[in-house]
Image: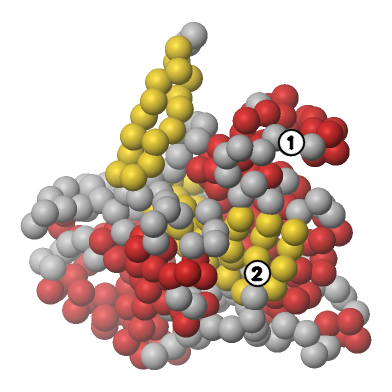
Amino acid sequence: MDGEELTEQETALYDRQIRVWGVDAQRRLSKAHILVSGMKGTVVEFCKNIVLAGVGSLTLVDSREVTEEALSANFLIPPDENVYSGKTLAELCCDSLKDFNPMVRVSVEKGDISSFGGDFYDRFDVVVISSCSFATKKLINEKCRKVSKRIAFYTVDCRDSCGEIYVDLQNYTYSKKKLDETDECQLQYPSFEEAVTIPWRALPKKVTKLYLAMRVIERFEEAEGRNPGEISIADLPGVLKLKKELCEAQSFNESHVPDALLERLVSDTSEFPPVCAILGGILGQEVIKAISGKGDPLKNFFFFDAIDGKGIIEDISNPNPGS
């Protein structure tokens, strides 16, 4: 991302945001290559934000066709069925995103994202995935961590009015302004697998209940061989049974994972557009920080629940990584 200066056209187009975060940050953005998989409502909000910010390129992966659920939250899909008939979600979103900023190269990669090798991921600076299983998130995170350069890795999921963002920047160095000085700071991030398999009794005492509830739903879908979101109120007894088993196995108080919250998460798995906008905005902001190396990055989970309107950052890291 280093070495090339902004063109006159880029400088003119991005003048306002250059005034906010500086020429160097904009130069880094314009050379950054981003991969996104899972074109649901939260992800398209992120894509819109990052394209308007002026990244170098954006590659989309999603071979699914348009469904009624997709239409409810994905504003990039044209309303005319004749236009989207026969096209994948990635292709439709690609066509729309090009109109937001012609200077950003937006393209589609066909295939199963979990089947791509390390050389494929080495082409990107940022990888964002959504709408995939626990096993797929773990696999892609591992592939990103094995390439020679540092890849910023994110997962994002929205279930009804609740959402979660996970961040892995590996060994990350960034600049932080303090009065008239600029300090260099470092953060060490756990892998996705490490962050979601930490024993519950080792978690911070007041960890958000959403973290725990999301893990129960994730485990249930994995155990049942379901795709993300393939769950309904009919599955609630099974979900509650699994919660009880997980809590007993870890000697963990069941009251910390409320049945009412789990019921909400299984009752309606469709995305709530206002929450998509919030999560997409936060994710866009975090990716810009990671690319520019400026500002305190999120470590390593962000949760949002529209019921109370609160956004919560949780640092979920193994206190004893060597054990």
Residue 255: tell me if it is visible: no
Residue at the outermost front position: 3
Left or right: 270, with 202 as reference point: right
> For the point 35% across and 63% down, which residue is it?
146
Q: Earlier in the sequence, mark 1 or mark 2?
A: 1
Figure check: 227 above or below 216? below
Pick the front one: 30 or 287: 30
Residue 254 drawn at (x, y percent): 22, 67
Residue 104 drawn at (x, y percent): 76, 54
Residue holding disc 2: 60
Marks 1, 2: nearer the viewer: 1
Label 1 crowding class (10 Å Cα cut-off): few <14, some 14-19, many 20+? some
Left or right: 190, with 159 as reference point: left
Q: Which amino acid does label 1 sit on?
A: Leu
Q: In which quarter of the image is the N terminus?
A: top right
Residue 169 drawn at (x, y percent): 40, 49
Residue 145 image-quadrant placement: bottom left
Q: What element carries label 1?
A: loop
Q: What element carries label 2?
A: strand
> For the point 64% across and 43% down, which residue is it?
29
Residue 176 image-quadrant placement: top left
Label 2 crowding class (10 Å Cα cut-off): few <14, some 14-19, many 20+? many
Q: What residue type is labelled 2?
A: Leu
Q: In which quarter of the image is the C terminus?
A: bottom left
Count the numbered circles shown: 2
Pick the front one: 209 or 166: 166
> For the point 39% across and 83% down, which residue is it?
221
Residue 91: tell me if it is visible: yes
Marks 1 and 2 sit apart, C-alpha to C-alpha, by 25 Å
Figure check: 184 above or below 250? above
Residue holding disc 1: 6
Figure check: 37 above or below 316? below
